[in-house]
Amino acid sequence: MKTIGLIGGMSWESTVTYYQIINQVVAEKLGGLHSAKCILYSVNFAEIEQLQRNNQWAESAAVLGEAAKKLEVAGADLIVICTNTMHKVADMIQAHITIPLLHIADATIEKLTKQQVSSVALLGTKYTMTQDFYKSKIIDQGIAVHIPEAADIEIINTIIFHELCRGHVLDESREQYKRVIESLVAKGAQAIILGCTEIGMLIKQADVAIPIFDTTIIHAEKAVELAMQ
């Protein structure tokens, strides 16, 4: 089994989910007392979030690149960034290491393609929803991407940073997300991408009528698949 290197802490709430899923999948596949071989480097999210707000993406890439390098030196065979947003600088992080970095959008697109989804709604941070680094990968595969209206983008983003990243899961926020999802279904979305690793804390398949693609689960499962090849 290869060793999975996790760059976590963005937020640590969703990093816990990564660790749990990775070990659960290994146990399901191998049985007994088997668990994953993994190394976690958890950053201080307050520092990264400030760099995001200040549009200092190169500086944030340098921080995460150093984390990736340390994971490689420690023995990691592949790297997983435990957040969607920071895949904006995935190529810069990859430049710091010689081992592969598993891109969360690539893993998600693989799932969408297998299920022949041609139109999706994308929920995530405002960076993920409005910028091209994530959407363009999906669109390039011939899949249409719908995002919320501007006011709803702010609502989705605020709930992520002010509630979910702090471990607060509120029923009223779930209703807000469900309202936004319904509006995107009305625009033609066949499925929903939970394109922020914390959203799965709030929205489950039982909450919506169309399929959800939880990127945290997809990413973690793909990491195990690669680690066990």
Image: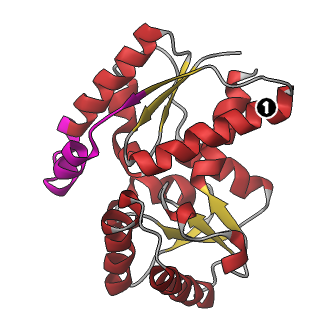
Front in this rendered view, residue 175 or 124: 175
- Which image quarter: residue 41? top left
| Residue found at x 77% / y 23% | 34
Question: Can you see residue 170?
Answer: yes
Report whether 108 appears left or right of 9.
right
Q: Which residues are magenta?
A: 41-59
Residue 149: horizontal and vertical position, in percent? 39, 85
Instruction: State left or right for residue 154 relative to residue 52.
Output: right
The quarter of the displayed image where residue 183 is located: bottom right
Indicate the position of residue 9 as horizontal and vertical percent values: 37, 41
- The count of marks equals 1
Q: Identify the residue under disc 1.
A: 27
Give, as a three-letter code, the residue at label 1.
Ala
Q: Is residue 187 magenta?
A: no
Dominant SS of magenta comes to helix
Asked whether 200 or 58 is in front, the reply is 200
Determine the residue positioned at 44% across, 10% down.
74
Q: How is the image coloured?
A: secondary structure
Q: Is residue 57 magenta?
A: yes
Q: Is residue 160 above or below residue 171?
A: above
Q: What residue sits 45% from the left and 54% below the top?
A: 134
Q: Which percent across, then down, holds residue 95? A: 35, 22
Q: Is residue 128 visible?
A: no
Specify whether 10 is left or right of 229: left
| Residue drawn at the location 72% of the way across and 70% of the way down | 211
Using a 10 Å C-alpha cutoff, classify the residue at mark 1 as few (fewer than 14 neighbours), some (14 to 19) or many (20 or more).
Answer: some
**Vertical arrangement, residue 57 with respect to residue 211, above or below:** above
Q: Quadrant of the N terminus?
A: top right
Identify the element where label 1 is drawn. Answer: helix
| Quadrant of the frame with the C terminus | top right
